[in-house]
Image (cartoon, rainbow, N blue to C red):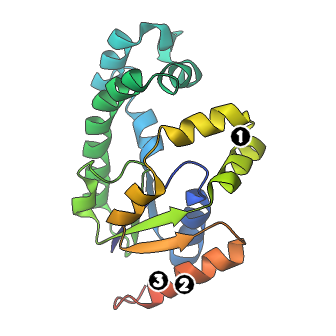
Amino acid sequence: MVIGLTGGIGSGKSTVLEYLKNNYNAFIIQSDYVAQEIMAPGHKVFEQISNIFPEAVSDGKIDNNKLSAIVFSDKEALKKLNSITHPGTVEEIIRRVKNSKSNIIVVESALLIGSGLEAYCDEIWFVYCEKEKRIERLMENRGYSRNKAENIIENQPSDDDYNIHADEFIDNTYSIEKTKEQIDFLLSMQECSF
């Protein structure tokens, strides 16, 4: 079973992934990490980003903080970056899905829908969290200012955009225990035994 896990920043996708990995032995593929791996020197994605965003390159590598500062305040720059990183990331994720022998494979991505990855997923799960709670988490866990957290959230798809494409909905606004109960319930509905 391949689960596509999506939702906005700060919604708690990591909590869901950790539980699936630890309790269901799921094979986890996180698109952000894959995107970072393919931005290493020597990869074609690195060369393309270096040409378009030379100010983001430091000591022969892409400086993620510099790159983030550029793209999260400029929608056009973000579109350019996505047009480079998404195809390479999707290609690598598909390769990993095809090579995995796990009973449960989870592909986590905030931009899953429309990437082409959804075609490889048996179900799409949307992890939801109230906006104010997401802002609080980003400020507390990542040290973001309120303004930075709000800007990032505003530059991502809306909850409705995520939800309309999802097969299942997980509300992660409240306790971790409530989230775990929802995950257990969703997997108990599957015919496969994990």
Residue lying at 62% horizontally and 74% vertically, measured from the top left = 179
21 w.r.t. 85: above or below: below
63 w.r.t. 123: above or below: above
Cβ atoms at labels 3 and 1 below 8 Å apart:
no
Asked whether 15 or 24 is in front, the reply is 15
For label 3, the SS is helix
For label 1, the SS is helix
Q: Amino acid at mark 3?
A: Leu
Q: Earlier in the sequence, mark 3 or mark 1?
A: 1
Left of 129 or right of it: where is 37? Answer: left
Label for residue 186?
A: 3
Label 2 sits on residue: 184
How far apart, in angstroms, are the residues tagged by discs 1 and 2? 28 Å
Residue lying at 53% horizontally and 25% vertically, measured from the top left = 68
Q: Residues within 10 Å of mark 1 (few under 14, many from 20)?
A: few
Q: Position of residue 102 (x, y in %)?
A: 37, 71
Label 1 sits on residue: 142
Q: Position of residue 177 (x, y in %)?
A: 70, 78
Q: Residues within 10 Å of mark 2 (few under 14, many from 20)?
A: some
